[in-house]
Amino acid sequence: MSDSPLSSIRLDIWLWRARFFKTRSASAKMCESGHVRLERFGTVSRVDKASLAIRPGDRLIFALGARLIDIEVVDMGERRGPALEAQALYKFKETSSDASAKPSH
């Protein structure tokens, strides 16, 4: 690991590293479809480019299957690692729909 963490990364790469998509091309397609929302400094905007740079503290909102994903970016990551490593890249935001969005076991 390097001593200087990345300050930003392309959105499509980050979504792939965080394991929301199996392939980077699927991640890029989702970004370019306009179905991802980015909240930065209290301003929400629609993402239409996979190359958009995101940073820790950014909030991402998008639909994945029947689930609405609302997360805060915590870290950039250095690679597409195992699931536990990927889960450390983000944290779920608390919303009223969280109870229905999380799978029940």
Image (tube, rainbow, N blue to C red):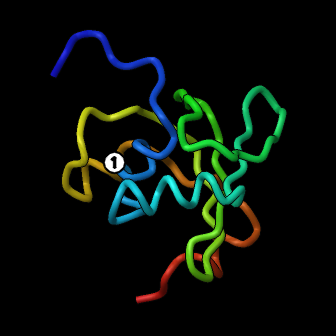
Please tell me which residue lies in front, 98 or 1.
1
Q: Quadrant of the rendered structure where residue 97 is?
A: bottom right
Residue located at (71% from left, 56% from top): 34
Residue located at (47% from left, 46% from top): 12
Q: Say which residue label 1 marks.
A: 17
Q: Position of residue 69 (x, y in %)?
A: 61, 63
Residue 27 drawn above or below residue 46: below
Q: Tag 1: residue type? A: Arg
Q: Residue furthest right?
A: 43
Give the structural element (helix, strand or loop) at label 1.
helix
Q: Position of residue 65 (x, y in %)?
A: 57, 80
Label 1 Cα crowd, 10 Å radius (few <14 / some 14-19 / many 20+): many
Q: Position of residue 81 (x, y in %)?
A: 20, 49
Q: Position of residue 76 (x, y in %)?
A: 39, 32
Please tell me which residue lies in front, 57 or 36.
36
Q: Residue furthest left?
A: 1
Residue 36 drawn above or below residue 57: below
Residue located at (62% from left, 42% from top): 49
On the picture, is 82 further left or further right than 100? Answer: left
Please tell me which residue lies in front, 83 or 37.
37
Please tell me which residue lies in front, 56 or 23.
23
Residue 6 drawn above or below residue 9: above
